Image: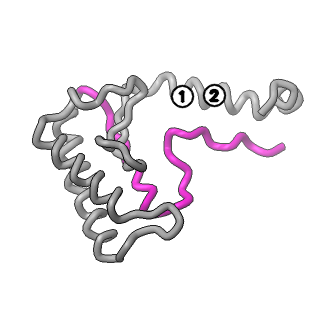
Amino acid sequence: MTAEWLRSNPAALEYLEARSKELQDRPPTITLMPDYSVEVPLWTLEGETDDLVSEALLAKLKAWQATFDANFRPQTGWESDEVKTAWAEDAKSLEAELRSEVAGIVEVEVDLWPLNPGYLHTEQLDLPPTI
């Protein structure tokens, strides 16, 4: 997006400014989201997550991420429906445990994009409205 395009589309600029303010005003957030070859599938704007959770939960999160790395391929998806289903079920219990451990400290978002490949990640800005 260029500055010229934004100047010629005031509704888009207004939308982006409002969305930016919305993101700035939200409480501190941690996102549970796998990604290729990361050790811990937790994301914050500050980048520090390990100190937010217990060692026991950290170990579970690392194992969940390792299952993703071993069984999900960018071009073909999951190695089997059984692994996909088990991984999704594990996500539910990890989310509950994570929410419990960080309650009152940060908000929790969950992005399970491998269950819906092609999904736009939650931290990405939506496209501005068309004019």
Q: What's the magenta region?
A: 105-131
Q: Is residue 23 left or right of residue 64?
A: right
Looking at the image, which residue sits at the far left?
A: 56
Name the residue at 73% across, 28% down.
14
Residue 48 drawn at (x, y percent): 32, 26
Residue 112 within the magenta-colored segment of the rendering: yes
Q: Residue 67 at x, y = what percent?
A: 28, 59
Label 1 packing within 10 angstroms: few (<14), some (14-19), many (20+): few
In three-dimensional space, the C-alpha distance between marks 1 and 2, rounded to whole angstroms, equals 6 Å
Disc 1 to disc 2: CB gap under 8 Å: yes
Against 47, is 57 above or below?
below
Question: Which residue is at the far bottom?
Answer: 81
Secondary structure predominantly adopted by residues drawn in magenta: loop
The three-letter amino acid code for the residue at tag 2 is: Ala
User: Does 14 appear above or below 126?
Assistant: above
**Which of 76 and 21 lies nearest the eye of the viewer?**
76
- Mark 1 lies on residue: 22
Q: Is residue 91 above or below residue 76?
A: above
> In the rendered image, which quarter contains the C terminus?
top right
Q: Residue at 34% across / 35% down in the picture? A: 30
Q: Quadrant of the N terminus?
A: top right
Q: Is residue 38 left or right of residue 104?
A: right
Q: Which residue is disc 2 drawn over?
A: 18
Residue 122 at x, y percent in the picture = 49, 44
